[in-house]
Amino acid sequence: MEDRVDARILIARPRVPREFYQRRASTVAPALLGLILVHETPEGITAGRIVEAEAYEGPEDRACHAFGGRRTPRTDVMFGPPGYAYVYFTYGMHWLFNVVAGEEGLPHAVLVRSIEPLAGLELMSRRRRGKLPLAEGPARMTQAMGIDGKDNGKDLVSSDLYIVSPPPGLDAPVEYIATERIGVDYSGEWRHMPWRFIEKGSRQ
DNA sequence: TGTCCGATTGGT
DNA sequence: CCAATCGGACAG
C-alpha cells in the first residue's frame, strides 16, 4: 500500500477560495471533481482526489435536509456562509461529509461520495480495518479520512479539513457524467434530477 | 415522550 | 434481500 503523492506536496497547494463555493450546488458539485480533499489529524495526513459528488439544493429540493427551509440544529450549517463542512450522522452508524455551497442563507450543499486515495493510504486502510474499497461510497470515504461529527461546521478555507487544487500531473481536465442521485427515492420528482456527478470510468 | 425512518454498508 | 443501530424530525 503506497502513496501516489507525497502529502507534503498536497498540503502546500493553494486552497480553494471561499468564492468557489459561493455558487449553486449543482455548479459546485462537478467543479469539485479532480480537486483534492485533505485532512490533517493527530494520527496523520490523508488526502484523495474527489471523483464523485452530489448536489442538494434546498429549500426547493425535496431530497435536501433543508427542504422547505427546515432549519434545525443539524441543518444550521447549511444556512451559513459557503465553504464550511456539513457532516451528519445517519443509519445509526455512518457519517456523511458535505461542502456548504450557495450564498449565505441559501441552504445548498454538495455530498462528497467518493475519492481516489492519494496520500496516507496506510492510515486510511487502518481506519477502514483493512476493508475494501477504501474510499468509494460516502460513509467509506469519511471513515477512511477520519471525518466525523467533530468536523461538522469546520471552515474548509482555514481549518485542518480542506480542499486544494491538484498539483501538476494530476490537473488534467476531468471528464464526467451526470446521473440521478443515490438513495433519494423518497423525494418525488426530485429523485430524477441529474445531480450526481462522477468522473468518467471511476465508478459507473 | 413515542414513533418512524434514513443522502449506507456489509453479509446472506 | 435484509439487518445493523441510533439521532433527528415531528406528532401528540
Image (cartoon, coloured by chain):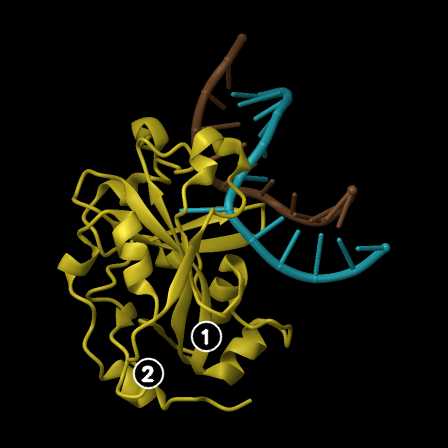
Chain colours: A yellow, B cyan, C brown
Nearest the eye: A32 or A128: A32
Relative to A96, B2 lies left or right: right
Residue type indicated by callout 2: Leu
Task: State whether residue C11 is above or below residue A61.
Answer: above
Residue A83: x and y in percent read 23, 56
Residue A146: x and y in percent read 46, 68
Task: State whether residue C5 is above or below residue A30.
Answer: above
Nearest the eye: A158 or A185: A185
- Mark 1–mark 2 distance (CA, rounded to whole Å): 12 Å
| Residue drawn at 34 percent across, 71 percent down | A174
Chain letter belonging to callout 2: A
Can residue A149 be seen by looking at this rendering? no
Mark 1, residues whose alpha carbon is within 10 Å: few (<14), some, or many (≥20)?
Answer: some
- Quick one: label 1 or label 2, which is nearer the N terminus? 1
Residue A68: x and y in percent read 33, 26
Residue type indicated by callout 1: Glu
